[in-house]
Amino acid sequence: AQSVTQLGSHVSVSEGALVLLRCNYSSSVPPYLFWYVQYPNQGLQLLLKYTTGATLVKGINGFEAEFKKSETSFHLTKPSAHMSDAAEYFCAVSFNTGNQFYFGTGTSLTVIP
Amino acid sequence: DAGVTQSPTHLIKTRGQQVTLRCSPKSGHDTVSWYQQALGQGPQFIFQYYEEEERQRGNFPDRFSGHQFPNYSSELNVNALWLGDSALYLCASSSRDWNNEQFFGPGTRLTVL
C-alpha cells in the first residue's frame, strides 16, 4: 500500500534559522513527489515537485527538497526561515501520470521572531 | 488566467440534506480531481474526472457523486449529509499532457449541522 508520513505535526523555528520538514513515503513503484503549502483559509499552492531526473529540486520562495530513494524520503528545507513561511505544509505522492495524490497529515510551521 | 475556481466559498447544511459544489479548472486543463480535507488532516482523494467520466475513485461511499461537463468544469454532489461530511472540499485540475502536477482551488468549506 502506498502512504506518506510526515514526521512532526508542528515545527517551530526562529526567524533566520534552517527549516527542515520531513516526509517519508512507502511505495513499490517509482513515485512522483510534491510539497504543497497551505495558508489559512486558502487552497494548496505547489512549492516544488520531483518527477524524474535530478534528485535535488528547487522550488519557490527559497525551498528545496531532495529525493533519496534509499531512504524513501523527500524532506523539505529552506536555509533561512522568514515570518511569511508560517503555514501548513503537505507532502504528497502519486505513482503514475494522472493518478490520485496521497497526502501526508501535514506539518504546521511556526516562525518565531 | 483565473486559475482553479470553486463555488460557493462557504456552505451550511443540515443532516440528511444534499449539496452540490462546483469547480472550474485552470485554462487548458482537462482533468478534475476532488479532495476532502477534514480539520487538521491532509486532503483525501474522492474521485477524478476526465472526458466526462469518473476515472478513479478513492475510499468514499456512493453518497459522493460527481459530474464533468464538456467545458471540463465539474460538480461534486453529496447526498444524505451527516456531521462527518463537514470539511474543506478542494478541487484540483491538471492536464493529461503534463506530468502530473495538480493545481488546487481555494476550496469550499462545508459545515453540516
Image (cartoon, coloured by chain):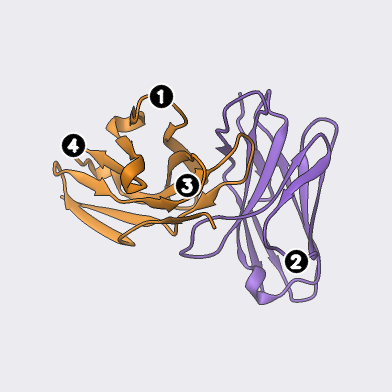
Chain colours: A orange, B purple
Discs 4, 1 touching: Cβ within 8 Å: no
Q: CA distance from mark 4 to mark 2?
A: 44 Å
Q: Are marks 2 and 3 on the same chain?
A: no
Determine the image quadrant of residue A58. Answer: top left
Frontmost of labels 4 and 1 is 1
Residue A95 falls in image quadrant: top right
Upstream in sequence: badge 4 or badge 1: 1
SS at circle 4: loop
* Disc assigned to residue B26: none
Residue at the image point whose x is 61% and y is 34% from the top: A97
- Asked whether, in this view, residue A107 is left or right of residue A51, the answer is left
On the same chain, marks 4 and 2? The answer is: no
Residue type (three-letter) at the residue carrying disc 2: Pro
Judged by depth in the image, the label closer to the viewer, 2 or 1, is 1
Subunit bearing disc 1: A
* Residue A92 disc label: 3
**Same chain for marks 1 and 3?**
yes
Q: Which residue is under mark 4?
A: A79
The three-letter code of the residue at mark 3 reads Ala
For the residue pair A6 and B105, the one nearer the viewer reads as A6
Q: Which mark is residue B61?
A: 2
Find numbered disc 2 in the image and state the secondary structure of the residue it sits on: loop
Q: CA distance from mark 2 to mark 3?
A: 23 Å
Q: Secondary structure at mark 3?
A: strand
Q: Are marks 4 and 2 in contact (CB under 8 Å)?
A: no
Residue annotated with mark 1: A53
Residue type marked 4: Pro
**Whole-number angstrom distance, CA of label 2 to CA of label 1:** 38 Å
Instruction: Establish whether labels 2 and 1 are both on one chain.
Output: no
User: Of the residues tagged 1 and 3, which is closer to the observer?
Assistant: 1
